[in-house]
């Protein structure tokens, strides 16, 4: 990197907020995605939108790549500085700017950790629903950019359903605002949604206005085991058909059940083909009624055993089983790929069966769990990235998993985004015209391709 | 391959188990202050990985980054993959010591530690002449330095060194009339040379419960500070010395009144001798007998509650890292406090969150240690308590410093001191009660 640019960066954010030490750079060569690593030339930590603007203007002039980064927990290598250049670390901008209870809105800087926002609005009886597994570490900027979702996705949706407005710095340093506090806003292109989920390729988000929801007064959790995968699949559809939208409707396949049971002895039957974990929430009377109805539907669909949590302690036990899924699988082997292929919910059993068949054929270990209610599954491949022969089989299995999910009418990503991890499948989902349209948007907003180059839409130069 | 790198290769698989999920960011007190990757376990593990695969070296920069850890074990407790990050970081430091030698300040301090008699003399002298060098803060077991001292912040509130170390205040064996148990008391340095008040409380409380106490005079520092600095060879010397010393007494139990000291006996000593079966077996035998004082009082002795007098205090508790996560003792000190008449117990927000002391960490990085401490002080303040109970001398000193610096008045005690007060109050009450008060109806 040119020393002139380095000097300007130091002038803009202050010398102490530019890291160039070999050791520090190494610490920004990766994110939570296995298999990608590349050294940046500098890590720049801006404190204000104005500083972001100046950094981008300088980088754009010098045509040096910039990779915005929150907590680096994404699972698509979205923050790996594959072409060198500047990692723009947003964690210093971590103030909650405003909590507006009259309009049920909060305004935050991008470096705020999602759980910290939730802690702050809790005392007003409010929640910010998007809750990725990393809610306690991921930043608002990172979750908005990945369009992250979580356990409550079925009823509450993903990040884009809560973003009301953004302040965005464009590649050349100009600052733009989208949306705002008004609930009804239909003016112009929906720029807010465009930047939400853009994975740092279109602009750097410096302020976020989000919608808050009243916290549910009551919740009820239950767990049902199924000897037959198809029965579990039928039960999922039947719950929704009974006009009940649970906050959470999760599934674990047999491989996951066995692994969880091995590690944490939560009392799951290891012979079951599937376990469903369900939680309904809302007004106490409605919750009671819905829970009873869910139990009825589960019984009608041959659930072998149904456990309904009577109190908070039992509820915790049920969710402990689900929370143990990823850790238990991850402990099996050194490397863990958590995918998020998504299918229409009626196809969940087909998808699980296909994944099992792929695992057997390529002799790789895959456990599948995930958000059955919204069809968002997490086939989780555990392996050892130091074993080339095994990795060859793993990558082939991965290709087939995504091919199947598209074939079943699904999508490449239900919540994690594309990054470079899933770039090679993009064309098969969107076709040449779709990709061309996305690339023209990228080129229009970032003509020099300095923002997270090579990600999401691939090379655009 | 050089020895230092070989050390890291030994833990290569453990390092590879880190899936870089970043969950440790949530709990690391150092990361909370800096918000940069090299301050969290994930970053440090990545650095070790880069040394193993030849991408980088054990440089000064590597050393500095490994040093940025208070060994609070919070990351390890949180890690979904079971990565023992705190222990791996210590391995990283071992590699640094092998490759580059110890930090000069630590080197001088450990050289002193190594020669036990000299160490003893040095710290006694500090006790004798301490009042010349330190200014006393009334009522707090605390002083501030009068002169600049190397490695010590001028404003920092320290506890004075005792004019007479604890072990010189008592005979080797303190007998009781009908001994229920015979214990050997491992005082640790802090209690022997600084917080003798804690040691006295331990002696009183054990006596009150008919326990005979031996104070082996030749005991040495528990080795935790040297160990976490990565000087494993010296740590083993201390461990071996302590094991041999205590074996000679063959006590029913070994009792310590510091989370770190207890952890050393229970966990570190057996671990240290992984490749020496004889020493390992001896260490394990003693480890099984070792108890932290509140744990001993509650689980083994079932301490007397019938003769406790009133202690009027609103008490909150700070759980030292090595108590909460090192030896998992958090219920027993609370049970002790809750048994004391007059004590109103209030829980603070995150009682087991590190206070920032981290052994010698706060010596080398006082500013960071203070910012971490500020959160602890704020948590204490929000409880409205007038007293803080804890189970570690270093925490007591560091939290006292934080409270004084923030102009607050709470007192910090070891849990066992409050129990001691209650027994004493019980005695004061006694004569007031007329013996013939009982009437039969
Ligand atoms: C164990 C585990 C479980 C997970 N569970 C879930 C889950 O349930 N649901 C889910 O959706 N995700 C999940 N994730 C993925 C990940 O946590 C989310 O993608 C999260 O949103 C990333 O946030 P972050 O702050 O770490 O962002 P980063 O990883 O730092 O960045 C993510 C992307 O956003 C861009 N970016 C970051 N900040 C900005 C900004 N201010 N402006 C513009 N672009 C920016 C980056 O360039 C990158 O492309 C999981 C990850 C792990 C490791
Ligand atoms: S140490 Fe554990 S918690 Fe931290 S990143 Fe690695 S796997 Fe995750
Ligand atoms: S032991 Fe504590 S200070 Fe050290 S890395 Fe882990 S959480 Fe951070
Ligand atoms: S702290 Fe042991 S050295 Fe000191 S007294 Fe307790 S940890 Fe020793």
Image (tube, coloured by chain):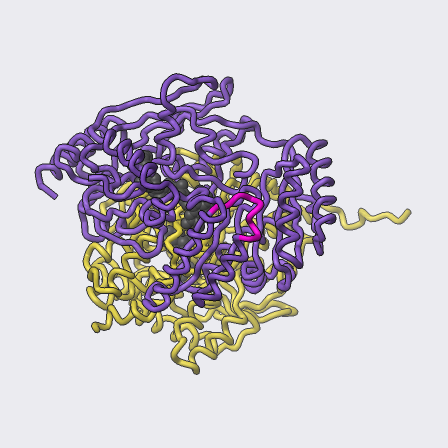
Residue located 21% across and 51% down the image = A39
Observer able to see residue A217: yes
Q: Quadrant of ligand 4?
A: bottom left
Image coordinates for residue A461, horizontal then vertical, percent: 19, 39
Q: What number of labels is visible?
A: 0
Residue occupying the point 49% across, 53% down: B391
Residue shown at the point (57%, 39%) measured from the top left: B314
Q: State the image quarter where residue A173 is shown.
A: top left
For the colour purple, the matching chain is A
- Magenta span: A342-350
Residue A370 vs residue B73, the one in the foreground: A370
Q: Residue furthest bottom?
A: B278
A301 vs B233, nearest the viewer: A301
> Could you say where residue B84 lies in the image, as x and y percent from the top left?
41, 61
**Magenta segment main secondary structure:** helix
State whether residue B27 appears in this view: no
A285 to the left or right of B327? right
**Residue A348 is a magenta residue:** yes
Q: Is residue A443 above or below residue B58?
A: above
Give the left or right position of residue B235, taking residue A24 as reference.
Answer: right
Q: Nearer the viewer, residue B197 or A367?
A: A367
- Image coordinates of residue A48 in percent, x first then y, are 27, 28
Q: Is residue A38 magenta?
A: no
B270 vs B180, left or right, is: left
Q: Which quarter of the figure has residue A441? A: top left
Q: Which chain is yellow?
A: B
Residue sitting at the far right: B441
Q: Is residue B224 above or below residue A98?
A: below
Q: Quadrant of the N terminus of chain B?
A: bottom left
Q: How far across and how far down the image is residue A352, in percent?
A: 53, 55
B106 relative to B413 in the view: left or right: left
Residue in the foreground of this view, choosing between B356 and B120: B356
């Amino acid at each position: 990197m040119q020393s002139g640019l380095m000097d300007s960066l130091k002038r803009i954010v202050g010398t102490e907020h530019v890291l160039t030490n070999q050791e520090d750079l190494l610490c920004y060569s990766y994110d939570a995605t296995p298999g990608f690593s590349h050294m940046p030339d500098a890590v720049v930590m801006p404190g204000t939108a104005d500083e972001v603007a100046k950094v981008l203007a300088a980088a754009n002039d010098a045509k040096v790549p910039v990779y915005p980064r929150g907590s680096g927990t994404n699972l698509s290598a979205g923050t790996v500085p594959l072409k060198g250049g500047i990692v723009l670390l947003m964690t210093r901008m971590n103030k909650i700017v405003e909590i507006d209870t009259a309009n049920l809105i909060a305004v935050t800087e991008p470096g705020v950790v999602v759980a910290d926002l939730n802690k702050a609005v809790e005392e007003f009886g409010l929640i910010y629903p998007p809750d990725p597994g990393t809610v306690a570490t991921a930043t608002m900027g990172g979750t908005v950019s990945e369009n992250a979702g979580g356990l409550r996705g079925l009823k509450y949706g993903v990040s884009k359903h809560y973003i009301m407005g953004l302040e965005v710095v464009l590649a050349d340093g100009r600052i733009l605002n989208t949306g705002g506090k008004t609930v009804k806003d239909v003016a112009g292109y929906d720029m807010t949604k465009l930047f939400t989920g853009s994975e740092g390729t279109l602009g750097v988000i410096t302020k976020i206005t989000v919608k808050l929801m009243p916290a549910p007064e009551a919740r009820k959790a239950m767990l049902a085991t199924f000897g037959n995968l198809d029965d579990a699949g039928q039960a999922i559809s039947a719950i929704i058909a009974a006009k009940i939208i649970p906050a959470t409707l999760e599934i674990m396949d047999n491989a996951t059940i066995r692994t969880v049971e091995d590690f944490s002895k939560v009392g799951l039957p290891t012979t079951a083909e599937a376990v469903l974990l369900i939680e309904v929430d809302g007004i106490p009377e409605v919750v009671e009624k819905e829970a009873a109805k869910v139990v009825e539907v589960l019984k009608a669909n041959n659930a072998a055993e149904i456990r309904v949590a009577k109190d908070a302690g039992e509820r915790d036990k049920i969710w402990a089983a689900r929370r143990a899924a990823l850790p238990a699988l991850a402990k099996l082997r050194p490397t863990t790929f958590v995918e998020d292929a998504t299918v229409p919910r009626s196809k969940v059993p087909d998808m699980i069966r296909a994944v099992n068949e792929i695992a057997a054929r390529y002799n790789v270990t895959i456990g599948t769990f995930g958000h059955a209610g919204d069809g968002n599954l997490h086939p989780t491949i555990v392996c050892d990235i130091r074993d080339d022969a095994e990795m060859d089989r793993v990558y082939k299995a991965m290709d087939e998993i995504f091919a199947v999910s598209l074939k079943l009418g699904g999508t490449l990503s239900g919540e994690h985004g594309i990054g470079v991890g899933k770039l090679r499948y993009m064309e098969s989902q969107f076709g040449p015209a779709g990709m061309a349209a996305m690339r023209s948007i990228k080129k229009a907003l970032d003509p020099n391709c300095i923002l997270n180059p090579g990600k999401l839409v691939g090379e655009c130069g | 391959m050089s020895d230092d790198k070989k050390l890291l290769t030994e833990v290569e698989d453990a390092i590879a188990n880190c899936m870089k999920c970043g969950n440790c960011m949530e709990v690391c007190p150092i990361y909370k202050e800096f918000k940069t990757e090299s301050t969290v376990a994930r970053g440090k593990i990545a650095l070790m990985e880069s040394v193993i695969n030849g991408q980088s070296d054990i440089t000064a920069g590597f050393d500095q980054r490994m040093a940025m850890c208070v060994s609070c074990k919070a990351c390890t407790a949180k890690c979904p993959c079971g990565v023992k990050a705190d222990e791996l970081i210590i391995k990283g430091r071992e590699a640094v010591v092998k490759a580059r030698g110890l930090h000069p300040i630590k080197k001088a301090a450990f050289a002193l530690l190594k020669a036990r008699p000299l160490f003893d003399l040095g710290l006694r002298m500090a006790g004798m002449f301490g009042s010349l060098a330190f200014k006393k803060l009334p009522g707090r077991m605390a002083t501030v330095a009068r002169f600049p001292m190397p490695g010590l912040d001028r404003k920092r509130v320290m506890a004075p060194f005792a004019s007479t170390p604890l072990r010189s205040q008592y005979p080797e064996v303190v007998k009781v009339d009908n001994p229920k148990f015979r214990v050997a008391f491992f005082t640790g340095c802090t209690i022997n040379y600084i917080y003798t008040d804690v040691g006295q409380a331990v002696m009183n409380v054990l006596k009150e419960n008919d326990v005979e106490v031996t104070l082996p005079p030749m005991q040495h520092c528990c080795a935790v500070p040297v160990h976490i600095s990565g000087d494993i060879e010296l740590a083993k010397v201390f461990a071996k010395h302590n094991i041999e010393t205590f074996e000679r007494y063959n006590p029913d139990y070994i009792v310590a009144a510091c989370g770190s000291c207890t952890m050393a006996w229970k966990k570190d000593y057996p671990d240290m001798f992984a490749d020496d079966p004889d020493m390992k077996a001896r260490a394990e035998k003693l480890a099984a007998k070792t108890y932290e004082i509140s744990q001993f009082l509650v689980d083994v002795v079932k301490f007397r509650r019938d003769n406790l007098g009133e202690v009027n205090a609103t008490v909150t508790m700070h759980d030292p890292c090595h108590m909460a996560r090192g030896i998992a003792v958090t219920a027993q000190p609370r049970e002790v406090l809750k048994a004391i008449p007059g004590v109103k117990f209030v829980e603070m927000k995150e009682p087991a969150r590190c206070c920032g002391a981290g052994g010698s960490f706060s010596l080398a990085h006082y500013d960071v240690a203070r910012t971490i401490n500020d959160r602890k002080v704020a948590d204490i303040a929000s409880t409205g308590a007038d007293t803080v109970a804890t189970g570690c001398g270093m925490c007591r000193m560091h939290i006292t410093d934080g409270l004084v610096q923030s102009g607050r008045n709470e007192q910090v005690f070891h849990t066992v001191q409050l129990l001691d007060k209650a027994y004493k109050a019980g005695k004061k009450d006694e004569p007031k009660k007329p013996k013939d008060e009982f009437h039969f109806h």
